[in-house]
Image (cartoon, coloured by chain):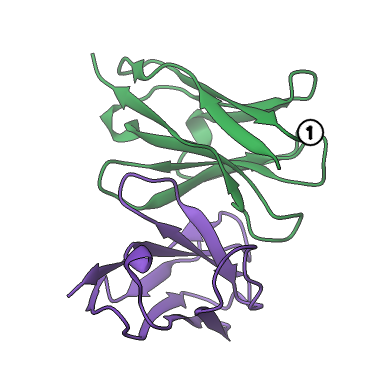
């Protein structure tokens, strides 16, 4: 059973860069799956951030595209999110997830989530 | 982007009730719709999708229907474990988008 675990700083300064990694265990990133990021601001709903395939192909939420990068490291069996020029509006719980299979439900497996606060 | 609208925002119900949640898409998404459940302070979990495939371990008291732009999730005989917020999500075309959620609370 694949498991996902987010890691990274819990506090980022305004205008700084948010960098998170999702470690994959119990399976490989080199499968026919899309690996994604979803976030949830305090008291709010879910927001899809983007996803990546093990080949490096990716899709981004247009609202974040200018600040966003999602990559995969096959040697470390992990994928990452980088969000630049952050503001308080980027404060959220960030989840990594995996789909059920190409063309299927995007978030069948979820990590535990990591709270990232943007504050000076 | 495809907009997803869920109704009602909050649904008050009693144990044993049958409830129906609605999700509408701003354009046709075929049957590319998933439902997630989230309990307070917990990670969202995938419940099921419109082809009526239940995620492994999910009770058959959940059922879904719909296609195109109108979808429903029905929960039969509400139990304490079912009180949560439910989100729909379309995966017909990027960017994937979620509805704002329906909170099912105890009356």
Q: Find residue B41 and report its image quarter.
A: top left
Q: Which residue is disc 1 drawn over? A: A28
Residue A61 appears left or right of A27: left
**Which residue is at 45% across, 44% downward?**
A63
Specify few, some or many for label 1: CA neighbours under 10 Å numbering under 14, 14-19, or 20 or more: some
Residue drawn at x 64%, y 60% is: A105
Identify which residue, A18 or B88, lies in the foreground. Answer: B88
Q: Farthest residue toward the left?
A: B107
| Secondary structure beneath label 1 | loop
Q: Which chain is purple?
A: B
Residue A73 % position (x, y): 73, 22
Relative image position of residue B80 (x, y in whole percent): 32, 67
Query: What subunit carries mark 1?
Result: A
Q: Residue at x 30, y 18 (%)?
A: A14
Q: Look at the image and tell me in which quarter the C terminus of chain A lies.
A: top left
In depth, the one of A1 and A87 nearer the eye is A1
Q: Which chain can be seen in green?
A: A
Q: Is residue B101 visible?
A: no
Q: Find residue A57 and report its horizontal and vertical position in percent.
A: 75, 38
| A25 relative to A66 in the view: left or right | right
x and y, in percent, of residue B13 in the image: 24, 79
* Tally of numbered discs: 1
Q: Quadrant of residue A36?
A: top right
Task: Locate residue B49 relative to residue B79 in the image: left or right.
Answer: right
Q: Which residue is located at x 68 percent, y 26 percent?
A: A78
Q: Is residue A76 above or below residue A101?
A: above
Quadrant holding the N terminus of chain A: top right
User: In this orientation, does residue B38 appear?
Assistant: yes
Quadrant position of residue B10: bottom left
Q: Is residue A104 left or right of residue B89?
A: right
């Amino acid at each position: 059973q694949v498991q996902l675990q987010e890691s990274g700083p819990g506090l980022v300064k305004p205008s700084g860069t948010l960098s998170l990694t999702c470690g994959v265990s119990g399976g490989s990133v080199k499968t026919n799956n899309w690996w994604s990021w979803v976030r949830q601001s305090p008291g709010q709903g879910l927001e899809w951030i983007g996803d990546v395939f093990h080949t490096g192909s990716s899709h981004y939420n247009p609202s974040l595209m200018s600040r966003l990068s999602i990559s995969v490291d096959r040697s470390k069996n992990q994928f990452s999110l980088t969000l630049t020029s952050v503001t308080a509006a980027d404060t959220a719980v960030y989840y990594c997830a995996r789909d059920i299979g190409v063309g299927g439900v995007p978030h069948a497996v979820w990590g535990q989530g990591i709270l990232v606060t943007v504050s000076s | 982007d495809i907009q997803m609208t869920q109704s009602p925002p909050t649904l008050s119900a009693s144990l044993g009730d049958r409830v129906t949640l609605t999700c509408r898409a701003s354009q046709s998404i075929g049957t590319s719709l998933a439902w997630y459940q989230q309990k307070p302070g917990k990670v969202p979990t995938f419940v099921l999708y419109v082809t009526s495939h239940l995620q492994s371990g999910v009770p058959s008291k959940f059922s879904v229907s719909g296609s195109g732009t109108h979808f429903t999730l029905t929960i039969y005989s509400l139990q304490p474990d079912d009180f949560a917020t439910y989100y729909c999500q379309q995966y017909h075309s990027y960017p994937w988008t979620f509805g704002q959620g329906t909170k099912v609370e105890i009356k």
